[in-house]
């Protein structure tokens, strides 16, 4: 127990002063926290909570991006398989998928196939691109299309 003494010593000569006559004793007890301690603890907690919340939101965003990219890769592989089994004349240039993947679109572009720096092979290599609202991904597609005069 802490004891604090407040002295009310009058201006008397030392010989007539008795220590117990004018002394007040006040007892302090610490049963709780003062407001400053509570505010400091809340500030530290708030900073920690904000850091955790920011980290959680960033991880949620990254998980969504990874999920969307995985879905796009799977859809592109599926579409590539469908394009490989169809005849080259029946290959569409673009399309969309049905529910639940209606937000994903695909396009098939053909680019010249270059075997060396000076020689262009008379065929084109397909590039399958899958796009969605937040990104796109492209794949080299192993379908050769013979160049016609209108493609040159």
Image (cartoon, rainbow, N blue to C red):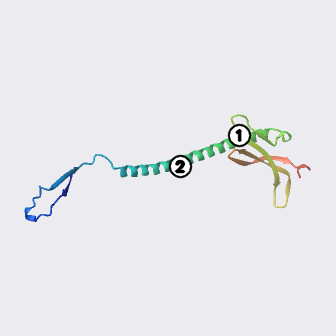
State the SS at label 2: helix
Say whether disc 2 or disc 1 marks the residue closer to the N-terminus. 2
Residue at the outermost right position: 149
User: Does residue 139 appear left or right of residue 41 in this picture?
Assistant: right
User: Does residue 114 appear left or right of residue 26 in this picture?
Assistant: right
The image shows residue 111 at horizontal and vertical percentages of 81, 52
Depth order, front residue of 149/11: 11
Query: Label 2: how many residues lie within 10 Å, few (<14), some (14-19) or many (20+)?
Result: few
State the SS at label 1: loop
User: Does residue 61 appear left or right of residue 8 in this picture?
Assistant: right
Q: Residue at x 84, y 47 (%)?
A: 145
Q: Residue at x 56, y 48 (%)?
A: 58
Query: Label 1: how many residues lie within 10 Å, few (<14), some (14-19) or many (20+)?
Result: few
The quarter of the picture where residue 79 lies is: top right
Badge 2 is on which residue? 54
Looking at the rendered structure, the number of numbered marks drawn on it comes to 2
Residue at the outermost front position: 11
């Amino acid at each position: 127990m802490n004891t604090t003494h407040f002295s009310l010593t009058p201006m008397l000569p030392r010989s007539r002063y008795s220590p117990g006559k004018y002394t007040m004793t006040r007892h302090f007890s610490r049963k709780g926290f003062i407001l400053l301690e509570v505010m400091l603890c809340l500030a530290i907690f708030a900073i920690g909570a904000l850091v955790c919340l920011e980290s959680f939101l960033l991880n949620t965003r990254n998980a969504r991006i990874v999920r969307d990219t995985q879905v796009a890769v799977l859809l592109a592989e599926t579409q590539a398989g469908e394009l490989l089994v169809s005849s080259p004349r029946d290959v569409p240039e673009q399309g969309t998928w049905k529910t639940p993947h209606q937000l994903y679109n695909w396009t098939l572009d053909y680019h010249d196939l270059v075997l060396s720096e000076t020689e262009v092979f008379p065929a084109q290599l397909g590039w399958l691109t899958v796009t969605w609202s937040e990104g796109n991904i492209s794949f080299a597609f192993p379908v050769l299309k013979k160049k016609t005069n209108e493609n040159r």
